[in-house]
Amino acid sequence: MSAWVLPDHIADVLPSEARHIEEIRRDLLDMARCYGYELVMPPLLEHLESLLSGTGEALDLQTFKLVDQLSGRMMGLRADSTPQVARIDAHLLNREGVTRLCYCGPVLHTRPGGPHATREPLQFGAELYGHTGLEADLEVLTLALDSLKVAQVGAISVDMADARIAHALLKDLSLDAVQLSQIHAALAAKDGSELKVLLRNAPAATTRALVDLLQLYGDALVLQDAQRILPDLADIHTALAQLKWLSSHVEGAEVSFDLADMRGYAYYSGAMFSVYAPGASDALARGGRYDEVGLVFGRKRPAVGFSLDIKALVSVAAKRSLRAAIRAPWGEAAELRAAIASLRRQGETVVCVLPGHESQVDEFHCDRELVQAAGQWVVQAT
């Protein structure tokens, strides 16, 4: 095998795409800062027992593992940043009241999420800790939508669900983690036959309610249907009322509901959302409430957040024009070098043409040129 061949679902990012990714990354972090979110940078590598504790247990199969040559302990490369940010909130910051944190960095997956997905997503996310009310859910949802808008993604749609509905229907059953995961997968796949097999020992009323849940997807009328069809349980009433309130405050996006959707929501405890756009093979962003996330770190706090992969986002975001640059000759003259330095201090991109490469084209769009006129170095349009 050639030395330059990369592993499956791992790829270099070349200049044009890398520029687009970096511009979006900066826009997303600026948007989060506008909402009052502080940037944190969790490590890529942690002791395995810390990385896979609590909600991180669901990431076990997605986590690359290795031995630390210094301590001999098992280490893991993070597959998701959310458990790490929960640890930072609980142990390092330990603040009272509301804490808003955001992050952006690579995560690594042992397996791709889809046929064309990367195993090295560039994950951006935001987490809000310390507030139980729907105001926090709405803030995070609005930030997620604004993040996609600033990335210039058009025709955004939001699909909403609530983990409490399925939890309420399943809470009286004696299920282990594997059985629960299988039921969630059957719900997400709308596989009624498999669901009935998995629930063969459950009460008939529970099985019927969960099978009915598979049909509860569509527009706002779904919430009315759910109120009529599903069992009269307090958690279900609360979930439906909160979904109605949240959806009524969404602006600039089409809203739908899929009350059986449990994909990717292993640790969610309340309202959840997925954001879609034309051209994307899967949700661009996922988020919701996960109040149990800090429990393993000794500080159970209300928590709500979302995350997205900037590499996937770039594939559907509007293409951006190259920032115009200035073409300049290379030279040792103090006046020329001072003129180039002055332009760069003003924020201009100045590309010096090295000797012998005057006819070559580069990545930058040079619409101006630095030339000498009347003894002065001046910028002229090309």
Image (cartoon, helix red, strand yellow):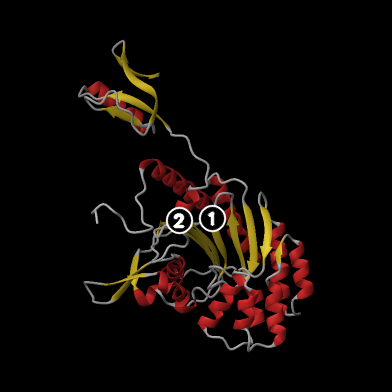
Q: Identify the residue position indicated by label 2 in the image.
A: 116
Looking at the rendered structure, the kind of residue marked 1 is Ser
Note whether 172 is above or below 239 in the view shown: below
Q: For this view, does 126 lie left or right of residue 224?
A: left
Mark before the other along the chain sequence, 1 or 2: 2
Number of other residues with Cα within 10 Å of mark 1, as a class: few under 14, some 14 to 19, many 20 or more: some
Note whether 250 is above or below 197 in the view shown: above
Q: Position of residue 40 (x, y in %)?
A: 42, 60
Please state which of residues 265 and 234 is positioned toward the viewer in this rendering.
Answer: 265
Displayed quadrant of residue 204: bottom right
Position of the N terminus, as image quadrant, is bottom left
Is mark 1 in CB contact (under 8 Å) with mark 2?
Answer: yes
Q: Identify the residue position indicated by label 1 in the image.
A: 281
Task: Give the structural element (helix, strand or loop) at label 1.
Answer: loop
Q: For this view, does 213 lie left or right of residue 294?
A: right
Q: Position of residue 193 (x, y in %)?
A: 64, 77
Q: Position of residue 302 (x, y in %)?
A: 56, 71
Number of other residues with Cα within 10 Å of mark 2, as a class: few under 14, some 14 to 19, many 20 or more: few
Viewer can see residue 250:
no
Position of the C terminus, as image quadrant, is top left
Note whether 9 is above or below 182 in the view shown: above
Looking at the rendered structure, the kind of residue marked 2 is His
Displayed quadrant of residue 246: bottom right
**How many marks are shown on the rendered structure?**
2
Residue pictured at 71% horizontal, 74% vertical: 212
Residue pictured at 53% horizontal, 77% vertical: 181
Viewer can see residue 81:
yes
Q: Position of residue 371 (x, y in %)?
A: 32, 17
Name of the residue lying farthest toward the top? 374
Displayed quadrant of residue 152: top right
Task: Give the structural element (helix, strand or loop) at label 2.
Answer: loop
Q: For this view, does 297 lie left or right of residue 132?
A: left
